[in-house]
Image (cartoon, coloured by chain):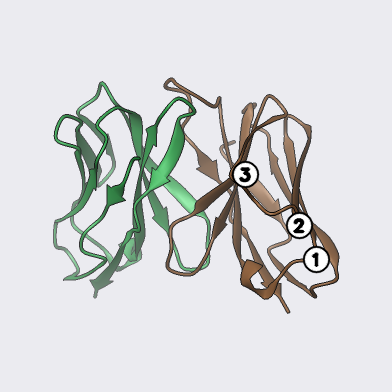
Chain colours: A green, B brown
Amino acid sequence: KQEVTQIPAALSVPEGENLVLNCSFTDSAIYNLQWFRQDPGKGLTSLLLIQSSQREQTSGRLNASLDKSSGRSTLYIAASQPGDSATYLCAVHTGANSKLTFGKGITLSVRP
Amino acid sequence: DTEVTQTPKHLVMGMTNKKSLKCEQHMGHRAMYWYKQKAKKPPELMFVYSYEKLSINESVPSRFSPECPNSSLLNLHLHALQPEDSALYLCASSWSFGQGAYNEQFFGPGTRLTVL
């Protein structure tokens, strides 16, 4: 059974800092991995999707990497801003039905 | 248009009420999903529809009844709910369901349900 872990559960950084959010998964037989952002009480916004054959994806100040063999992904946020404060969830597509398995998320607070 | 819409945004209902949640997408996606999310927890999959047919029911109680009238619309009918069913209900869609590259899921804003 696939398990996705995100540690730490919460992170507080000063504005302008570059930061890395980590995600690990137990079954390396994934189809792809998605990073989401969720603001309190809101839906999920898809940030980046990395296919199993890819090593990384970039969108603006965000860069996500994937090391499938070691079961790890990182989300790099450059020059963090208070508006980046949110919960970031990692999810992997695994199995014959390709269901999404989510981590518990990392709640990020960027201090002005 | 990469938008999934959900109505209503908020819903308060008694345990004897019958209500429905609605989800709509116009991206041509053929897979649609219902998730339930409790506070400070990740979303939990409830149902998956693929090409308007129910593909997955994650052992959800029968008081939740999904319906997919067409490829753009997904409903969740609620009846005789319990207070513990209070949660954020999220709808999502993707090009397809199953193996392959075209299953990036796009989520709606959710319906905040409170059962009294």
Q: On the image, numbered disc 2 is attached to which residue?
A: B63
Mark 2, Cα crowd under 10 Å, few <14 / some 14-19 / many 20+, is few
Q: Secondary structure at mark 3?
A: strand
Q: Is residue B113 shown left or right of residue A64?
A: right
Q: On the image, numbered disc 1 is attached to which residue?
A: B80
Please give the chain letter of the residue carrying mark 1: B
Residue A49 visible in rendering: no
Please give the chain letter of the residue carrying mark 3: B
Q: Secondary structure at mark 1?
A: loop
User: Up-down: is A108 above or below A102?
Assistant: below
Give the alpha-carbon distance from disc 1 to disc 3, as whole Å: 27 Å
Which quarter of the rendered picture does the C terminus of chain A lie within? Answer: bottom left
Mark closer to the chain start, 3 or 2: 3
Foreground pick, B59 / B54: B59
- Residue A39 percent across, percent down from the top left: 44, 63
In contact (CB < 8 Å): disc 2 and disc 1: yes
- Residue B53 percent across, percent down from the top left: 71, 28
Q: Nearer the viewer, mark 3 or mark 2?
A: 2
Mark 3, Cα crowd under 10 Å, few <14 / some 14-19 / many 20+, is many
Which quarter of the rendered picture does the N terminus of chain A lie within? Answer: top left
Q: Is residue A61 shown left or right of residue B92?
A: left
Q: On the image, numbered disc 3 is attached to which residue?
A: B4
Foreground pick, A82 / B80: B80
Q: Is residue B63 shown left or right of residue A55?
A: right
Identify the amino acid type marked 3.
Answer: Val
Identify the amino acid type marked 2.
Answer: Arg
Residue A103 visible in rendering: yes
